[in-house]
Amino acid sequence: MAYLANVLVFASGCSRYRERSQRDLILTVSVCGAMTLCSLPFFADWLAGGGSLAAVKPRTQLAETACVGLMSYMIADLSLGVLFYRERLLLGWHWIHHTIFVFILSFAVTRNLGHFFVVASMMELPIYLMFLGFLEPSLRNDYLTVATVFILRIVFHIALLVQWCLPSNRLLLRTGPGIYQWVPALLAIAAVPGHVQLLQRSIARIIRKSK
C-alpha cells in the first residue's frame, strides 16, 4: 500500500513536472514533507523535555508507519528511477544510501527505536524547502534553507549525537550499553560531513546569486 502511494504521487507529479531533472525530485519532496509532519509531535516532546530523548513518547503506530513509509519511498525511488530517470540515479546518494537506510529503518522498527528515528526526521525540513524551491522557483528562499540547515542539520543533529554518546542517556532510555546506543551514535557521526557539506553548498549558492 505504501509503495502504491508513492507510485500514485509520482504519476500525479509527472503531469506537472515533465523534465527528468524535476521528476527525480517529486518523491523526495513528498516524503521529506511527510516525514517533517510526522516528526512534529516527537520533536515537540523533545523540546518540551528540555532537549532530552527520554522525553520522546514512542507513539509506536505513528513511528512505525513513518518508518515503513520511508522505506517504501526508497524502494520506489530506485525502481521508478530505473524506468523514468535512470541517468539521475547516483551510486552513492541513491543506490548505496537507500539500501543502507532500508536496513537502518528495519533495525529501528524491530528494536522499537522508530520514534527516535522519526524525531530526527525533523532534519528533513531543509531538504523539503530546498527541493520544493527547485520544483517551484517562486517558492524558493535560500536564506530560509540555510537557516533550517544550520538549526536542524547542524545544531539539532549535534545535540542528538551528544545525547546518544552520554552514559546518562542510556540510563534514561533504559536501553543499556551496546548496539542500542552505539548504532545510532555511529550513524549520527557518519552523517556529520554530509550535513556540513550541505550547509556549505547552501551558503555558496547565496554568495553566487549575490554577485
Image: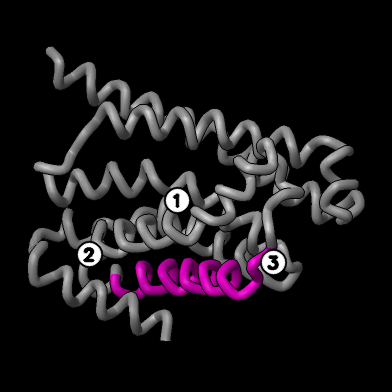
Vertical position of residue 146 compared to residue 54: above or below: above
Circle 1: element type: helix
Residue beneath disc 2: 85
**Residue at image mark 3:** 107
Secondary structure mostly seen in the magenta stretch: helix
Residue 185: image x %, image y %? 72, 43
Amino acid type assigned to the residue bearing label 2 in the image: Tyr
Question: Which colour style is shown?
Answer: one colour
Where the N terminus falls, by quadrant? bottom left
Residue depicted at x 80% and y 49%? 181
Magenta highlight on residue 67: yes
Which stretch did the figure color magenta? 58-80
Q: Which residue is mark 1?
A: 92
Is residue 197 found left or right of 45 in the rendered image?
left
Residue 132 versus residue 15 in the image, above or below: above
How far is the residue under mark 2 from the one under mark 1? 16 Å
